[in-house]
């Protein structure tokens, strides 16, 4: 794949400004899978499961400008005792992020300006920097709508439907936020058939957040973990369009449900 990287930074330090640094990364979309299988009496083995290994990429190029200062600054960023976020701009794609750490730094023996660093990404997926977002509000159900007739009927407002797109190449996982006075909550992805309900009555100042990411899965109510509220399956978004349904009892016309999705590339 011929990729032109037009922007690159690590935790905000720009690495390809051609003033202080002229660096690039390679192997961004390389991937390796572990396939776990069981032995059989017949030929071959039976497939059990598989997963993608950590990603290894290479950061390489030339340190410019005030060379000593910029070398030490780059080492300060890369060797900090925490993971780092690479932000990567590629022509024709959304801006991507990848969480990495450095495992190796080597310099050209004849020119310390020329460096090669090996970086590993424990999570091998690249993520869109900007999420796709859809807000779901009210569909009338025996409620006052225009044009209306007499006698007037007051009822509750149920949910709504919306589509969110995973632009990437691997399954992504939405973060769902629900606010305001409502109860009897049901969120489903009609594309996958996955659905969850939440046994909670929200007040005017309540915020319910459902994080479906496998590494950080949680249900929090006003910042307090409440995994007991969830009934059903966690929700996922395969590549392409995903149609979400949101239903609840409420008298509010507001879009009370927001679904946010960071597309993922492997």
Image (tube, rainbow, N blue to C red):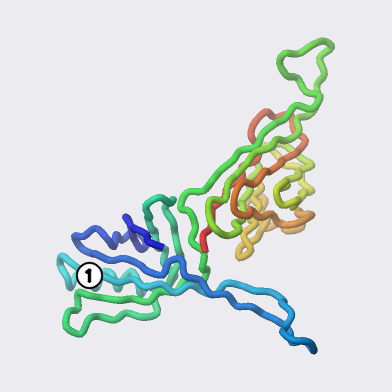
Q: Nearer the viewer, residue 134 or 83?
A: 134
Quarter occupied by residue 141? top right
Q: Please give the name of the residue rendered at 25% of the width and 80% of the height, measured from the top-left corner.
A: 107
Q: Residue furthest right?
A: 151
Q: Is label 1 in a helix, a strand or a loop?
A: strand
Q: Please give the name of the residue rendered at 73% of the width and 47% of the height, measured from the top-left corner.
A: 188
Name the residue that disc number 1 marks: 62
Q: Please give the name of the residue rendered at 61% of the width and 56% of the height, measured from the top-left corner.
A: 173
Q: Nearer the viewer, residue 256 or 55?
A: 55
Q: Is residue 11 left or right of residue 226?
A: left
**Residue 263 appears at what percent x and percent y?**
54, 53
Q: Is residue 168 above or below residue 201?
A: below
Quarter occupied by residue 228? bottom right
**Residue 149 appears at what percent x and percent y?**
79, 11
Q: Is residue 116 left or right of residue 222?
A: left
Please tell me how many numbered marks the rendered image carries.
1
Q: Nearer the viewer, residue 76 or 134?
A: 134
- Residue 83 showing in the rendered view: yes
Q: Is residue 210 above or below residue 185?
A: below
Q: Please give the name of the residue rendered at 64% of the width and 46% of the height, measured from the top-left corner.
A: 242
**Residue 150 appears at what percent x and percent y?**
82, 10
Q: Nearer the viewer, residue 233 or 216?
A: 233
Check disc 1: other Cα within 10 Å, few if <14, some if 14-19, many if 20+.
many
Q: Is residue 29 left or right of residue 215?
A: left
Q: Residue furthest top?
A: 150
- Residue 207 showing in the rendered view: no
**Residue 102 appears at what percent x and percent y?**
39, 75
């Amino acid at each position: 794949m011929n990729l032109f990287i037009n922007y690159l930074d690590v935790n905000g330090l720009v690495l390809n400004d051609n003033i202080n640094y002229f660096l690039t990364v390679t192997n961004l979309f390389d991937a390796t899978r572990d396939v776990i299988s069981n032995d059989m009496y017949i030929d071959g083995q039976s497939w059990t499961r598989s997963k993608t290994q950590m990603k290894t990429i290479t950061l390489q190029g030339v340190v410019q400008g005030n060379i000593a200062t910029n070398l030490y600054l780059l080492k300060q960023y890369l060797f900090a005792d925490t993971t780092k976020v690479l932000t990567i701009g590629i022509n024709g794609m959304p801006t991507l992020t990848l969480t990495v750490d450095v495992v190796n730094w080597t310099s050209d023996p004849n020119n310390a300006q020329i460096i090669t660093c090996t970086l590993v990404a424990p999570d091998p997926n690249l993520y869109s920097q900007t999420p796709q977002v859809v807000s779901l509000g009210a569909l009338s159900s025996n409620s006052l709508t225009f044009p209306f007739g007499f006698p007037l009927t007051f009822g509750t407002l149920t949910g709504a439907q919306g589509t969110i797109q995973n632009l990437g190449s691997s399954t992504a996982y939405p973060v769902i936020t629900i606010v305001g006075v409502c109860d009897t909550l049901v969120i489903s992805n009609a594309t996958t058939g996955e659905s969850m309900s939440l046994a909670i009555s929200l007040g005017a100042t309540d915020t319910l957040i459902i994080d479906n990411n496998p590494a950080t899965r949680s249900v929090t109510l006003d910042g307090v973990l409440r995994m007991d509220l969830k009934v059903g399956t966690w929700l996922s978004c395969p590549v392409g369009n995903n149609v979400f349904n949101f239903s609840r009892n409420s008298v509010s016309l507001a879009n009370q449900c927001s679904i946010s999705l960071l597309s993922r590339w492997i």
